[in-house]
């Protein structure tokens, strides 16, 4: 899965398939494009649980972390 990563204030990161990050919650913004990566289930990526991230994107359209901890459930 091709995932676009955006950074908000502090250590909050948003992960989405939406290239512009338009589906990320405005309450954490402003969002700044950070990088784009390809995520594959079972393959490690620094700072994020790939399987959890893909699950959230497939279910909610996005995945959010704060200091590398999942906070998606606090927003959805």
Image: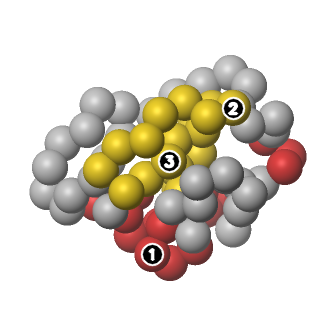
Give the labeled residue for mark 2. 32
- Image quadrant of residue 75? bottom right
Q: Earlier in the sequence, mark 3 or mark 1?
A: 3
Is residue 60 shown to the viewer in this render?
yes
Q: Secondary structure at mark 2?
A: strand
Q: Residue furthest left?
A: 42
Which residue is rendered at x = 59% and y = 45% of the image?
14
Compared with residue 71, is residue 56 higher up or lower down, i.e. above or below? Answer: below
| Label 3 SS | strand
**Image position of 2 (left or right of 11):** left
- Identify the image quadrant of residue 52: bottom left
- Upstream in sequence: badge 1 or badge 2: 2
Circle number at residue 58: 1
Other residues around mark 2 within 10 Å, as few (<14) / some (14–19) / many (≥20)? some
Q: Residue furthest right?
A: 27
Which residue corresponds to the image point at 71% horizontal and 62% vertical from the top-left?
23
Residue closest to the far bottom:
59
């Amino acid at each position: 899965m091709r995932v676009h990563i955006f950074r908000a204030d502090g250590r909050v990161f948003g992960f989405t398939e939406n290239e512009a990050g338009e589906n990320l919650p405005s309450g954490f913004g402003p969002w700044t494009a950070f990088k784009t990566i390809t995520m594959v289930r079972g393959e490690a990526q620094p700072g994020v649980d790939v399987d959890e991230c893909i699950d959230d994107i497939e279910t909610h359209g996005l995945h959010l972390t704060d200091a590398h901890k999942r906070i998606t459930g606090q927003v959805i």
